[in-house]
Image (cartoon, rainbow, N blue to C red):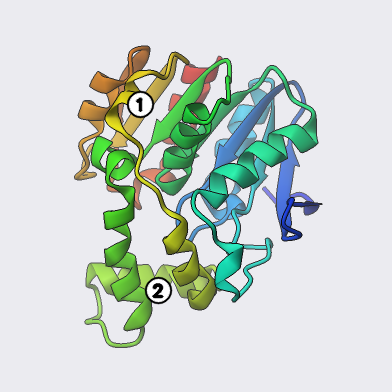
């Protein structure tokens, strides 16, 4: 499926943010993972098409510093929790009051942050995320800092090399992506436990994350395992079906 035309809005700090829309019906905001894009995460492997056919208006932003959104090289453009602020502003820009949320990896963590900061979606899906990713987010950035600071030095086939290869595929900006890491914030366990939105936690069978622990802390959760590794699960149709099941 070809990607739809880019639409944009301007965040409160003047940064231009891009998003794409597929389908019509019940609003669903989908947030992609770190280094990825809305097109790569949701359109390329058919998830958006599946959800549109199920009756959803699927909105897929490119997060700040990713894809067609601006990625300033000014550190002041990346205050704490800025991706959450951007997503909340997009919901306001779209005029939504009754909607659902979904996200993968960094996108899933941002969904949690949105609900902690007052978003009240009808349903939510957090995929490719474990409890540690949420409560210790700031410390998880060190891996990516190392990768982005040593591009071109990794052994072919290594995990770091695969991240770099993906970065090149999506034409990512390593400077902007590095600056974005400074915006990652930890979420207290008590704040996670206070989320009352029905939330599906979805994880790849070969993804080494404590997703079950996240589901155990969320009071209104379901838990689903789909095929794949952290990067591979995105390519499987099971992800789109799991999201459809969770938000329908």
Q: Earlier in the sequence, mark 1 or mark 2?
A: 2
Number of marks in the rendered image: 2
Q: Secondary structure at mark 1?
A: helix
x, y percent for residue 103:
49, 38
> Splitting the image into 4 quarters, where does residue 60 fall?
top right
Is residue 184 positioned above or below 109 on the image?
below
Q: Which mark is residue 141?
A: none
Q: Secondary structure at mark 2?
A: helix
> Splitting the image into 4 quarters, where does residue 152 fall?
bottom left
x, y percent for residue 129:
33, 39
Front-lying residue, 112 or 161:
112
Q: Quadrant of the C terminus?
A: top right
Q: CA distance from mark 1 to mark 2?
A: 34 Å
**Along the horizontal axis of the image, is 46 left or right of 188?**
right
Q: Which mark's residue is nearer the viewer, 1 or 2?
A: 1
Front-lying residue, 5 or 1:
5
x, y percent for residue 179:
48, 69
x, y percent for residue 166:
43, 68
Q: From the image, tell me which residue sits under label 1.
A: 192
Is residue 66 positioned above or below 11 on the image?
below
**Along the horizontal axis of the image, is 4 left or right of 64?**
right
Q: From the image, tell me which residue sits under label 2.
A: 165
In the displayed orientation, state which residue is furthest to the bottom: 153
């Amino acid at each position: 499926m070809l990607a739809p035309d880019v639409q944009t809005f301007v965040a409160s700090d003047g940064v231009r943010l891009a998003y794409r829309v597929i389908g019509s019906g019940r609003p669903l905001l989908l947030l992609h993972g770190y280094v990825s894009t809305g097109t790569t995460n949701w359109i390329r492997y058919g998830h958006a098409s599946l959800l549109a056919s199920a009756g959803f208006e699927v909105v897929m932003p490119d997060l700040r510093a990713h894809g067609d959104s601006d990625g300033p090289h000014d550190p002041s453009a990346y205050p704490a929790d800025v991706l959450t602020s951007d997503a909340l502003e997009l919901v306001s820009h779209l005029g939504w009051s009754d909607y659902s949320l979904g996200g993968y990896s960094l996108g899933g963590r941002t969904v949690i942050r949105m609900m902690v900061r007052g978003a009240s979606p009808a349903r939510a899906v957090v995929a490719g995320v474990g409890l540690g990713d949420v409560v210790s987010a700031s410390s998880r950035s060190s891996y990516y800092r190392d990768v982005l600071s040593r591009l071109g030095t990794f052994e072919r086939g290594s995990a770091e090399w695969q991240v770099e290869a993906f970065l090149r595929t999506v034409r990512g900006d390593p400077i902007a992506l590095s600056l974005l890491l400074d915006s990652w914030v930890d979420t207290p366990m008590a704040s996670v436990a206070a989320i009352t939105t029905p939330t599906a936690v979805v994880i790849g069978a070969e993804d080494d994350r404590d997703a079950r622990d996240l589901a155990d802390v969320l009071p209104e959760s379901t838990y689903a395992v789909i095929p794949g590794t952290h990067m591979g699960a995105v390519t499987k149709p099971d992800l789109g079906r799991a999201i459809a099941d969770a938000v329908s």
